[in-house]
Image (tube, grey):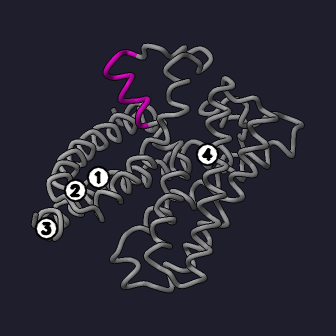
Amino acid sequence: MSDISVPSPRSIKALKIAASAWYTPVLIGQWIFVAYILYAYGGPLIAGNPAGMNAHLSDAYVQSRTFGNVAVAAHLALAVIIHFFGPLQLVPAVRAKFPAFHRWSGRAFVVTVIIVVATGAYMLVARGIGAWTLRAGFAFQGFLILWFAWQTVRYARQRKFTVHMRWATRLFLAASAVWFFRVLIMIWFVLTGGIGIDQSNGTGWFIDAMSVLQFLPVVLYEVYWRIKVGPSSRVRFAFAIFLWFAALATTVGVGLTTLGMWFPVLG
């Protein structure tokens, strides 16, 4: 009866620690991704060779298509803001010690993700990226980002900060879906050799599945939050164990993606 009526402080603490353990490689991995964007796309631009970006993203630069090229460049530049400042929004110490930074970087993050949705929509239509399933997944990501951004701002303005942080977490996870996409694909490559992926054109049944699975962190967060406020300490302990396994898998995935996709030269 006590487990039902009075949540165990130990189970709540165990769940929070496990969640932090999972989040640590996510934060570090996102910053590595920022370094990759600067290296792969910023490098060629600084060198005066924009066509060099095509080595990492097909048709990133198409001669004489100025508007499209600007849209791609803006999309990539703003992704740096998303993946550098976004993870910091969820760090309690940053919010507590640097509230002004949290507010202004949070506003920049929200504005940025909205612009990225717009430029990403143009890229999907004009550049025809991937199969229809992949484009549908990205379109759904855009819908989630806009919805979560609205709710995040809405509750911040109402000063309902607990609810605001739940929506901000959803927004961060939705905006990071493409990052999770890359990490999960690299894990799959190592485990199976790339079964279900046509490397010549980036299609295949696994890519189709990933169009949905990239939103798994959003789903798991909903489960985490409900378990956290729920009555069962046993379920919290069980989910904490799951998060530790997820933290290990994410750490391995970030390492594999860094050496195999972002900075293979390091391997």
Q: Which residue is mark 4?
A: 141
**Contact flag, marks 2 and 1 (Cβ < 8 Å):** yes
Q: Earlier in the sequence, mark 4 or mark 3?
A: 3
Judging depth in this view, the residue of 141 and 65 nearest the camera is 141
Q: Hey, what amino acid is under mark 2?
A: Ala
Residue 98: x %, y % from top left: 42, 84
Q: Earlier in the sequence, mark 4 or mark 1?
A: 1
Q: Is residue 216 above or below residue 92?
A: above
Furthest residue toward right: 64
Q: Which residue is mark 3?
A: 8
Q: Which residues are magenta?
A: 183-193
Q: Is residue 17 above or below residue 187?
A: below
Q: Earlier in the sequence, mark 1 or mark 3?
A: 3
Q: Which residue is mark 1?
A: 22
Q: Secondary structure at mark 3?
A: loop
Q: Earlier in the sequence, mark 2 or mark 3?
A: 3
Q: Is residue 61 left or right of residue 66?
A: left
Alpha carbons under labels 4 and 1: distance apart = 22 Å
Residue 200: x %, y % from top left: 59, 14
Which quadrant of the view contains residue 226?
bottom left
What's the mark number on residue 266? Answer: none
What's the mark number on residue 18? Answer: 2
The kind of secondary structure the magenta stretch mainly shows is helix
Residue depth check, mark 2 versus mark 3: number of the one nearer the observer: 3
